[in-house]
Amino acid sequence: MKNTIAERVADFLKRFPPFELLKSDELLKIAEEVQILYKQKDSVIFEQGEPGHHQFYVVHKGAVSIQRKENDNTETLDKCDEGDVFGLRPIFAKENYLISAIADEECILYAISIENFQPIIQQNYRVGEFLIESFASNTRNPYSREHRGRLYAEGEPKQEVAPELFQLQPVNFVKNIISCTKNTPVTEVAKQMSKNNVGSVLVVENDLPIGVVTDKDIRNTIAIGLFPIDVDVEKVMSSPVICYSKGLTIAQAHVAMMKHKISHICITKDGTPNSKVLGIVSEHDILVSQGNNPAALMKAIKRAKKTKTLKAIRSRVMHLLNGYLQQNIPMTHVSKIMFELNDATIKRVIERSIKKMKTPPPVKFAWMSLGSQGRKEQLLHTDQDNAIVFEDVPEEKLEETKAYFLKLAKIANKSLNNIGYEYCPADMMAKNPDYTLSLTEWKHQFTEWITHPGDDEILLCSIFFDYDISYGNPALTNQLSDIIFDLTENNSLFINTLASSALRSPSPLGFFRQFLVEANGEHKDFFNLKKRALMPITDAARVLILQHKIKNINNTAERYEKLAALEPENRELYLSCSYSVKALLKFRTKQGLLHNDTGKFIELETLSKEEKIKLKRCFKSVSDVQELLKLRFKITPYL
């Protein structure tokens, strides 16, 4: 008679390493001897200092927290999820546990006898290698700023990319290097630069790069009189040199220059300053290259004279975004680049729309991008959310002035739609008379929303509080910010209502941490990432930053980083939220590119086990920050 329980255990184990490496008969034999354990939330599986057990563990359902205690501080090293292996110390070291394992929530574990598993480790090198790596890898903390995931790499394997995707091609570097020593007078260096028609000279010592001097360095030091012209170049050079190895892509070079605020990168044999110099890359080298790099796209956007041209450029921007994701470029840099390209597109549309009007704007105005673009988080083609604020005018000129801006907005909204930005289903766009208002009208509107915070008013505030000026006079939007903060200051009713609204989004996970997917409709069995994860963590950041009266920080990740500085006691939570926001945006972007839509819904079948684990860890941050809201504002979520 078949042992159906053992077969079910084997079917589960074979989905995960290292059990996937076992033969069917080996796996079934292990499964027959597995002990199935149920643990309630916060129950101890083993404690730091406790003698090693005769078994190690695999998480079947739920989650386990791996912790280490030093003095009076307890640090969470890792969170083990479905399929994760832990408690391996007794296999490799006859010592007491150096860490503790605590049930993070109710869970079911498979306990596997070490004695029965030892022969498999000895016979199967790959299984043993995996377990040794797992044993050594105890720092997979998603809250860490360092590269995470020694057991499972954070990034995906690089995919083949089309040759025309220029920014992913290796950067061309100058091999004929002009160099000098640190004691060379600047006057001699300047002569070398002039003679060889170059903008930089590499400073070397024992054939190793120790600095770089550029024409900008000379302007900023010698030309303004900080040093005499014959001073040693050591005094004015930039050091240390940022080095990379051969094979650096144009995208990576561009991001590195942005990150380090430099204009030159040194190419060395091993990518460090401790090996032979192969060449040098300048910002100019990248800019003069042809292709879909950000600088070339920005230049094309500013020169575009037709909507169809902007639409074509937009498809190249999406191509660039896809390449960045494949190369695993950090989302912080990707978001900034994509925001600037999106913002430049909007600016160009407004400029062209004004030219289509018979007369120039009658008064100063500002075009505001709302929602995700206002938070600098819009990476994909999403629907438009925008508004206009214009200077106050005499009562008799108000209707005429508003009519002008409504006509302008209609042209701009249509052009954006033609480019690929869908119309807002709720009509929250500048062409709607409700959202093109004078400064005083906006003040009255915000006063109404904030002093009478019903469901609709809170929804509007959550959209209109996240705005960024895309075109026009910033003094107008600054005054709007002052109005909002004046109205919300000491307004506990509004803040509490806003906090309560942030708790409305349903939990991302159900019983035993299963994804709660759509039960019916067009997206049946898909996971609503926007509603269940991005919205609640975004809403929480908004209300918390508003409570602290912090202006001009609209980006959600940046809001959490600011909160981490303001509230040191909650630093770990806020930094985990910042990390989670970036990860969730990356999930959404990848799904949007996969399905050619907004990425709102995730097809779970397209995710790997590692991606599902990472997604669930992000949900932990959502849950934790919602708990903070409940305690701080003494409210309960809507059921």
Image: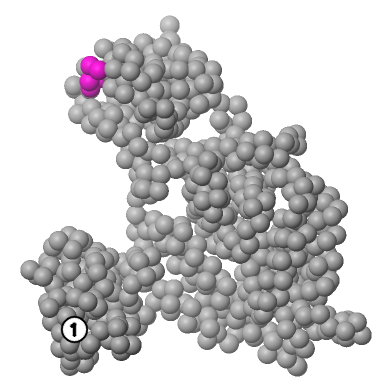
The furthest residue to the top: 1
Q: Is residue 561 above or below residue 80?
A: below
Q: Is residue 570 above or below residue 352?
A: above
Pick the residue in front: 118 or 183.
183
Q: Whole-percent x and y of residue 49?
A: 33, 18
Q: Whole-percent x and y of residue 305?
A: 58, 87
**Residue 556 lies within the magenta run:** no
Q: Which residue lies at the image location 41% right of the left edge and 23% below the top edge? A: 101
Quadrant where the N terminus sits is: top left
Pick the residue in front: 459 or 610.
459
Is there any visible trace of residue 135 in the rendered image? yes
Q: Is residue 261 above or below residue 98?
A: below
Q: Which residue lies at the image location 51% right of the left edge and 44% below the top edge? A: 568
Pick the residue in front: 201 or 424.
201
Q: Which residue lies at the image location 24% right of the left edge and 64% below the top edge? A: 244
Q: Which residues are magenta?
A: 91-95
Relative horizontal placement of residue 590, taking residue 483 as reference (left or right): left
Q: Whole-percent x and y of residue 401?
A: 83, 84
Q: Which residue lies at the image location 87% right of the left edge and 81% below the top edge? A: 398
Is there any visible trace of residue 535 in the rendered image? no
Pick the residue in front: 94 or 346.
94
Quadrant where the C terminus sits is: top right
Say which amino acid is labelled 1: Val
The residue tagged 1 is 231
Quadrant hosting residue 292 = bottom left
